[in-house]
Amino acid sequence: MKKTAIIKQILECEIKDDSGLNDFQKLASNQGIFIPKVGMTRFRLPISLRYPDGQLRSHDATASMHISLEKDKTGVNMSRLCVILQREALDTPLSAELCKKVLDCYQSELKDSDQDADILSAGIKIKFHYAHQQKSLKSDNWGWQYYPVTIEARQQLINNEKKFRFFITINYEYSSTCPCSLSMAKQYEKDFKDGKTTEGFGIAAAHSQRSEMQCMVEIKEKSTYFITDLLKLIRTSLPTETQSLVKRVDEQAFAILNGSYPMFVEHACRMAYDNLNQESEILDWLASFEHFESLHSHNAAATIFKGIPGGLHHSAVF
């Protein structure tokens, strides 16, 4: 559309809202271009979560919201995306059910008139930090562990039926001890003890590093599988999770734990692969791993996915 045509539409807008102000957004578009996603990002609001102990806790969250825009429509009433989300989430904890209700409202309430068909597609993405009370490995202590979490829902109208999809993404930090480095350290210690070398002092430390897994899963519709369930699965796959509070006995226990699970980034991939594939409530999944090397100035990284047709095949690392 030419600049002069837009200016003319603004100055001569014939559509008014209930207060009598120009409602430019409701003007028809003659450009004939469909927009798959239009909406808002970085909208902040408090989101409540029900924890396994039954308590409700509030979290500072940011939301991204979108709908599709038909080729004959000029724009979207953006504020209504926010109003609907705030209204529905005010007294209701975050869940797949809440997300579906919000998307239903987007598709029906953001129409320009009751005569219009429901909007073709809608989506929402909510990001926050999930807090977990983590017990120390040996001592009678605990600390807060925080996990960056993204809850995402998408809904599309296909043959007059709504297809709903629900995703959970969690970032999980763990420690990885290099098997190659551990093997060479033990070889050196044995050689020193046997008198084959006099280099050093007879003690060698295998290098290990803080590492991160980003795991995205698609959950079955109407399933109650949620954040804590996915965290339990990941912890089973990668037991060397970083600790929030340690005393000396906990630090020693962590060293023993790391020695029990030496791993390359390739090992981490395969350790997660089996558990993710065996969970019946997970339809599809994608996992990316990055080991922030203490030996190199560069990192080791890998991505693995379930591999179903049309599934999650993109890379979150490379």
Image (cartoon, helix red, strand yellow):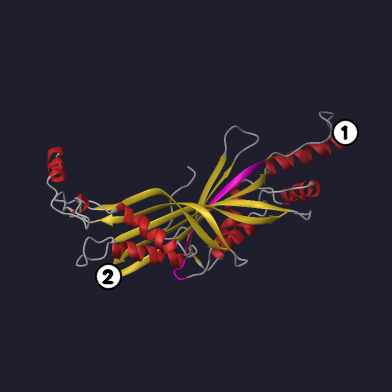
Q: Which mark is residue 160?
A: 2
Residue on which the image places disc 1 = 195
Does the image show residue 79?
A: yes
Local crowd size for mark 2, using a 10 Å CA cut-off: few (<14), some (14–19), many (≥20): few
Q: Is residue 35 left or right of residue 215?
A: left
Residue sitting nearer the eye, 110 or 29:
110
Q: Is residue 282 left or right of residue 291?
A: left
For image coordinates 46% across by 65% down, the residue present is 96
For image coordinates 53% across by 67% down, the residue present is 225
Question: What distance separates the C-alpha of mark 1 from that of mark 2?
Answer: 79 Å
Q: Is residue 48 left or right of residue 21?
A: right
Indicate the quadrant where residue 9 lies: top left
Does the image show residue 310?
A: no
Q: Residue furthest front?
A: 19
- Closer to the observer: label 1 or label 2? 2
Provide the residue span drawn in magenta. 209-222
Local crowd size for mark 1, using a 10 Å CA cut-off: few (<14), some (14–19), many (≥20): few
- Disc 1 is placed on an element classified as loop
Q: Which mark is residue 123?
A: none
Image quadrant containing the N terminus: top left
Percent coordinates x, y for residue 39 in the rendering: 33, 51
- The amino acid on which the numbered mark 2 sits, given as a three-letter code, is Asn
Residue sitting nearer the eye, 284 or 78:
78
Percent coordinates x, y for residue 48 in the rendering: 51, 60
- The amino acid on which the numbered mark 1 sits, given as a three-letter code, is Gly
For image coordinates 22% across by 67% down, the residue present is 114
